[in-house]
Amino acid sequence: MFRLINVHDRAALHVDGVVVDLAELSGDPALADPMVAVSRYRELHEFASRAAGQTSGVRVADVVLGAPVPTPRQVFAIGLNYREHAGESGMDVPPAPLTFAKFPSCIAGPTADVPLSGGAVDWEVEIVVVIGRECSYVNAEDAWDVVAGLTLGQDISDRVVQFTGAPPQFGLGKSFPAFGPIGPALVSLDAFEDLDRIALWCDVSGERMQEATTADLIFSIPVLVAYLSSVCTLYPGDLIFSGTPSGIGAARGRFLVEGDVISSGADVIGELRNRCVPGRGSAATTPA
Ligand code: ZN
């Protein structure tokens, strides 16, 4: 079992509440790179158990963490993957995973500030799947074998940009800077009691907005991996935002404002805490 974190752009393990630098622990300088560490996820169990019980030094609580997977090659996201969320969005349950991309430049750390691109920016807490090895045509029954672990994410969405034009193209509205905070750790699969029932929730400035478990997913994580890998080759560090439960702002008529704090949490994985700050619009937020 391991919890992989990113401390000042170096891969580290979170062991007994303490930061353990992975390159120092292993004696392998290549493992300082968080993306290399993800691709070698099978070795991390051994390193984590080697460090257990003999840790001292900087406490994880005292450092600012970066994204555990800072530069994924591909970031997939799934729309309408919880039944109640499809309902609140006024959409039918899709016949296949409704897939769009978040551009990787939106990925940010677990406590990153989120600059607001406009007046209709919304929250979407999601369990994020981290691919561990290059693969294609993976069967759903084998899908967990290609997963390095899970993390938590926010699929922050500018609803105006997301729904501009017909048919709307979701990518840009979900890809402003820091619209994809993830973390606080990439957690190995063996840390979870039940991989098909992971609780997740989202509070905005202290008000509970979303709460569900992944048992409510329409397309399960293994089905998503099988589906996506039947089209795209998947690479180590690729992310799959697996969909958000009901309770988004668009359905409540309430969007994020400056000073709001988005607190997202999930069983085992931990919490994200993202403050909304002034941003600037773009040509996309004010279409001609
Ligand atoms: Zn989403």
Image: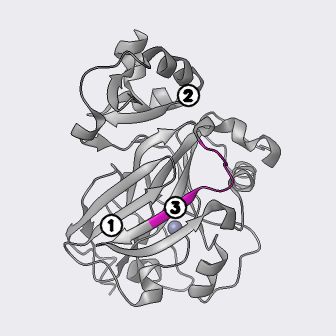
- Give how far apart the Cα atoms at labels 1 and 2 are: 30 Å
- Which residue in the protein does label 3 denote? 200
Marks 2 and 3 sit apart, C-alpha to C-alpha, by: 24 Å
Q: Identify the secondary structure beneath mark 2.
A: helix
Label 1 vs 2, first from the N-terminus: 2
Q: Which residues are magenta?
A: 192-201
Quarter of the image for residue 83 reads bottom right
Q: Label 1, secondary structure: give it.
A: strand
| Residue type pointed to by label 2 | Tyr
Q: Nearer the viewer, mark 1 or mark 2?
A: 1
Dot 3: element:
strand
Q: Position of residue 162 (x, y in %)?
A: 45, 77
In-front residue for pair 194/151: 194
* Crowd band around label 1 with a 10 angstrom C-alpha radius: few (<14), some (14–19), many (20+): many
Q: Which secondary structure dominates the residues rendered in magenta?
A: loop
State which quadrant residue 214 falls in: bottom right
Describe residue 111's horizontal placement relative to residue 89 as left or right.
Answer: left
What type is the residue that disc 1 sits on? Ile
Alpha carbon of mark 1 to alpha carbon of mark 3: how far?
A: 13 Å
x and y, in percent, of residue 232 in the image: 67, 49
* Residue drawn where x is 29% and y is 60% of the image: 274
Q: Which residue is mark 2?
A: 41
Check the image and report above or below for 135 versus 121: above
Q: In the rendering, which numbered label is found on residue 262?
A: 1
Relative to residue 167, is residue 117 drawn left or right? left
